[in-house]
Amino acid sequence: MTLSSSRLVATVLFILLFPGGAAGQKFSETALPGECFRGFAGAFVLYDMNADAYAEYHPAACKARLTPASTFKIPNSLIGLETGVIRDEHFVIPWDSVARSFPSWNRDHDLSSAIANSVVWYYQELARRVGEKRMREAVAAIGYGNGDISGGIDHFWLGSTLKISAEEQVGFLRRLYSGDLPFSTRSMEIVKKILILEKNDSLTLRGKTGCATQEDGTVVGWFVGYVEKGKNVYFFASNITSNNAQRDGDIIFNARKEVALAVLRKLGIL
């Protein structure tokens, strides 16, 4: 991407998200095409690296901490690698033979396939092997959300005590990209590799979904990641929520990624 096209995207962002042009002005929700969020409450944070600028949809929601659900597989992978619990992306944890609702989970998995298929049991076992002490220290060291892992070593990120905001998700991803986390370069490069969802001549998309119902009954669907395009990088974190998990849980599970992709397409990033 040329410098002029990067500036164009930045200009479009502020026209769409901050109609008056100044980030400090009151935000108008109608500025971003509402159909992207399919009628759900939601948040979207975008950081344009070259412009060194943020844009947000529903800024108050962007600051609200929610369960990270399976987006925590990103730091969980880093922690597993750094502690030596797993050697690399090819490290296999055997299936425990318990049949689960997703057929793709019901087999042995390595780190690469476990993150691609969002295999909860693999990461629960990984967390148990890391242990509460090392996990607490690592989560504190990276400043991840509220840092609260008291909800159980194999459950704290699944609608339990750990919470993180969309703004904090973007901050964490920026540090991963720049290598500014307290992990080895090797660990971070492995995780960057296994997060690739799409790669072609024009861009690379890395990301991770997540979905869970919180203890207060709110169902949360996430998609977080970043797009490398030309000489620029766009970091994003998107969530949609509903206080009626029974009615909307499946819808949010299926829509969480597409909502974020729709926004990125509207902005010309994808």
Image (cartoon, grey):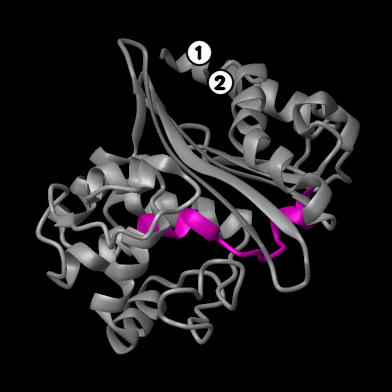
Q: Confirm or deny contact between disc 1 and disc 2 (CB under 8 A).
A: yes
Residue occupying the point 64% across, 48% down: 221
Q: Is residue 129 left or right of residue 251?
A: left
Tell me if residue 183 can be seen. no
Q: Is residue 61 magenta?
A: yes
Give the vertical position of 149 relative to 206 (above or below): below
Q: Amino acid at mark 1?
A: Ser
Alpha carbon distance from label 1 to label 2: 5 Å
Residue occupying the point 62% across, 28% down: 258
Residue designated by label 2 = 7
Residue designated by label 1 = 4
Point out the stretch of residues depicted in magenta: 58-75
Give the vertical position of 95 relative to 116 (above or below): below
Residue occupying the point 79% across, 34% down: 18
Q: Amino acid at mark 2?
A: Arg
Q: Is residue 221 left or right of residue 86?
A: right
Instruction: Classify the position of the N terminus by image quarter.
Output: top left
